[in-house]
Image (cartoon, helix red, strand yellow):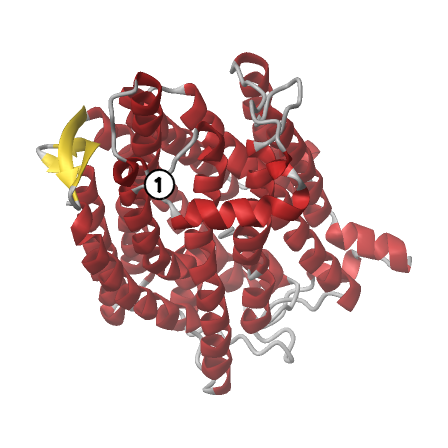
Amino acid sequence: MSYGTPYMTTLGIPNSITTLVWLSGPVSGALVQPLFAALSDGTRHPWGKRKPYIAGGASFVSLSLLGLACAEDMSSWLTSTSSSHKHIYAMGPPKASALTKILVAFWVCALNIAIQPLQNGVRALIIDSCPPHQQSTAAAWSARFNGLGAVAISASAFADVEAWAPVLGETKFKALCVLAVLALGAAIAPACALVPDEPSREVDARHRAVSLFARLWRTAGNLPPVTRQVCKVQSCAFTAWFSVLYYSTTYVYQTFVIDQHVHLDPDIFGAADPRLIDMGKHAGTRASLVFACVTFASSLILPLIARHSVLQQISGHHVLVVTVCGLSLGRIWYLAHCLFAALMFLTCFVYTVPAATIIVGALGVAWSVASWAPYALISTEIASLKARREGGDGSTEKDMGNWTDETTAGIMAIHNMAVSLPQIGAALGCTVLFKLVEISKRDDPAAFAFKFAGIMAVVAAWMGRSLW
């Protein structure tokens, strides 16, 4: 995501419009993923109830990535024009054709839709396949592999993969897209081949399409207590994380522009040294690599010092929780939000690229916790409820939350809605904010978005106190 924004910027797409294009992500997460989740919970395919959506989603994600990478080529082919003029340096991004911009927007939307069944299917399969005491470990390994993939992509971008592996593509973004497709195939193929997945056992009419959202509505109204609170915290947390995930590279680039006094008027050609623009982009790429490395290192270390689940009370309910150095996972998540907020407010005093890089890199610690803690909390609770229901331990309806084996994907979809819906508001807010910054002739809109993210991180930390 962080490389998509600079790519669209090089095509001459304004920051305010770029934010609207990225809006397709949270909209798809809020509307499309629940649909696939409800379908998945009722699927009786011979492959199982998760694998068809994982395989299909991975296929369409690959197609969308390749389409996005080749948008300029497709535009040139459709209009029968040469693409040689597209890479002329100026005091700002080169202007691409309107068709190229439309194709980029289309493929970004297609990508965000295609990733929903893949994402939900993988998370539900992890919960279905692991017992309660392994859920935090499974969530940790998921975060580790996500971090490893981010490191690989960031390192490839920093090392100019298009130069040493031209077979992947003649531009950096194209090469990164091809690498992502190859990595996705290498990860999904063995998972689909080796991990067992059973078809749904429900056969009644509740799985008709007309009732899918009615089932999701019932699931949302009967969420287990910890899962419900996690969703509330996430609704604030991802309002803050939106700016970081989409604009961290842009933030460092804009800091470089201000620090080095680079003029970026897109209507004046030839007056700026193109090397300065390259250096700014390289600084953003380096910061993204630092962020990925810190995230990966943290995802390795924190779960290693975590103890297995122990029984505690949260909000009056007995639940299994994970402790790290004597602190519950909920408290670790709270501290991560505090760190997140502090780093965002520190941007008020950052004016150099090294300082901006340190800020972005340190965010990797908070992001590693955000990628692990909420999923570990939810999956541990769901797996525990499953074990208690199967064991017939006499748990009350209040504790069980009307949970059944066939609502796992639905619960994860509700959680994804809690993640996605706030990002819609964040995207619209960033659009207005960036437009105001453009009007004021400033070159640092991402810095303003980061300061707003700090405020929302404080709110998320305050709401997360009940998970201690």
Q: Residue at x 42, y 74 (%)?
A: 261
Q: Is residue 148 left or right of residue 358?
A: right
User: In which quadrant of the rendered view does residue 142 lie?
Assistant: top left
> What is the three-letter code of the residue carrying label 1?
Ser
Q: Where does residue 432 sit, x and y in percent of width and height? A: 49, 78
Q: Is residue 426 left or right of residue 22?
A: left
* Residue 162 at least partly seen: no
Q: Where does residue 45 sit, x and y in percent of width and height? A: 66, 23
Helix, strand or loop at disc 1? helix
The quarter of the image holding the C terminus is top left
* Residue 141 at least partly seen: yes
Q: Is residue 397 left or right of residue 310?
A: right
Return the residue found at the far right: 80
Of 464 and 218, the residue lying toward us: 218
Residue 148 higher or lower than 242, as above or below: above
Q: Where does residue 219 sit, x and y in percent of width and height? A: 44, 44
Of 439 and 336, the residue lying toward us: 336
User: In which quadrant of the rendered view does residue 396 lie?
Assistant: top left
Residue marked by disc 1: 371
Q: Residue at x 22, y 57 (%)?
A: 463
Q: Residue at x 51, y 80 (%)?
A: 435
Q: Residue at x 51, y 16 (%)?
A: 195
Of 291 and 284, the residue lying toward us: 291
Return the residue found at the far bottom: 440
Of 82 and 306, the residue lying toward us: 306
Q: Residues within 10 Å of mark 1 (few under 14, many from 20)?
A: some
Q: Where does residue 425 sit, x and y in percent of width and height? A: 46, 68
Count of marks overlaid on the render: 1
Residue 273 higher or lower than 330, as above or below: below
Residue 72 higher or lower than 407, as above or below: below
